[in-house]
Image: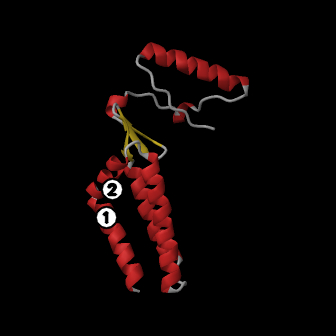
Amino acid sequence: MDDFLIFTRSRWHLRRAVRELNLLLSRFGFEQHPDKTFIGRLSKGSDWMGVSFNTAGCTAVAPRAINNMLQKLRRLYEQTRHLTAQQRQVRVVRYLQYWLRWARGSDASKDSTEHTLHRQSKLSNDITYFLRVIFDS
């Protein structure tokens, strides 16, 4: 495990938690990477492991996760051009199903995830385009 999220109510609690984490890591010969450590206020929002967090909690799929999914979808489509149309459809739809299952499961509120996905018209347009190209070929 190499990622940690620590939520605290005050700076004092945060310092104490970080100190305890550093002690625990040092017992096993590990240390924080200074360039990969981020400390910030949740009111400004943050993305971690593909989801967005703010003071309301886990609010939606992170924009970067959506962009990564679209890039993967494009690559998958290009990589399967040698397959028959039906095989291509199966591969792309299977990937979309897995990703959407992850997206719905990673969000604290399924309604929020659906709202986020529908609100991002680029995502809807890209998925619609890919499915149309795949199923029409």
Q: Please give the label number shown on residue 124.
A: 1
Where's residue 119, x and y in %? 26, 55
Which badge, 2 or 1, is on the more N-terminal residue?
Answer: 2
User: In the figure, 9 relative to 54: above or below?
Assistant: above
Secondary structure category for the residue under label 1: helix
Crowd class of label 2 (few under 14; some 14 to 19; many from 20; radius 10 Å)? some
Asked whether disc 2 touches disc 1, contact meaning CB atoms under 8 Å apart, the reply is yes
Q: Is residue 81 visible?
A: no
Answer left or right for 80 relative to 120. right
Where's residue 46, x and y in %? 39, 37
| Residue located beneath label 2 in the image | 117
User: In the figure, 91 relative to 31: above or below?
Assistant: below
Q: Residue at x 62, y 22 (%)?
A: 22
User: In the figure, 23 relative to 106: above or below?
Assistant: above
Crowd class of label 1 (few under 14; some 14 to 19; many from 20; radius 10 Å)? few
Q: Residue at x 51, y 76 (%)?
A: 90
Where's residue 32, x and y in %? 60, 29
Q: Residue furthest right?
A: 28
Q: Please give the label number shown on residue 46.
A: none
Secondary structure category for the residue under label 2: helix
- In which quadrant of the rendered image does the C terminus lie? bottom left
Where's residue 81, x and y in %? 50, 82
- In which quadrant of the rendered image does the N terminus lie? top right
Quarter of the figure with residue 20? top right
Q: Residue at x 47, y 59 (%)?
A: 99
User: What residue type is disc 1 on?
Assistant: Ser
Q: Is residue 56 visible?
A: yes
Quarter of the figure with residue 55? top left
